[in-house]
Image (tube, helix red, strand yellow):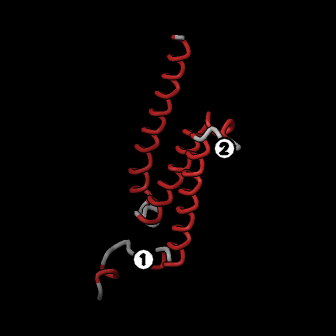
Amino acid sequence: MDAHSAAPGHDDAHHPSPMMYGKIAIVLFILTFFEVAAYEVGHRPAAILHAVVEPIVVPILLVLSAAKFALVAMFYMHLKQDSKLFSNLFVWPLGLAAALILGLIVLARLWRAASF
């Protein structure tokens, strides 16, 4: 008996194949391309879409980086194949922290708007 079959809860049938890891890597590359493109367009006044992208470049980067983080956590950290308890112990505090940060951003913008 090898180490994988002796470990409880380990089932190789549920783990992604190398082809799936390749697809995930391609999606991560594409998301990174969009992050770089959003930053470059948002910070170059000569760019065609600068006026549209510049005010929302930070939310775009936050959404794209959160999507990349979720893919990495689900597949490369094997949260998708593990017990739901481990996923919940990882995701709930992360969601709470994100909500807290978003709330602080909103409060800071409201405070700044009220002080001018």
Left or right of 81 in this view: 43:
right
Choose between 41 and 97: the one closer to the eye: 41
Of all residues, the one furthest to the top in this rendering is 115
Task: Name the residue tied to disc 1.
Answer: 11
Dot 2 alpha-carbon crowd within 10 angstroms: few under 14, some 14 to 19, many 20 or more:
few
Residue occupying the point 59% across, 53% down: 34
Residue occupying the point 54% across, 51% down: 36
Q: CA distance from mark 2 to mark 1?
A: 50 Å
Q: Amino acid at mark 1?
A: Asp
Please give the label number shown on residue 47: 2
Residue occupying the point 69% across, 42% down: 49
Q: Nearer the viewer, mark 2 or mark 1?
A: 2
Answer whether labels 2 and 1 touch (C-beta < 8 Å): no
Task: State the quadrant of the C terminus.
Answer: top right
Q: Amino acid at mark 2?
A: Ala
Mark closer to the chain start, 2 or 1: 1
Q: Is residue 58 above or below residue 106?
A: below
x then y, percent, for residue 37: 59, 51
x then y, percent, for residue 106: 53, 26
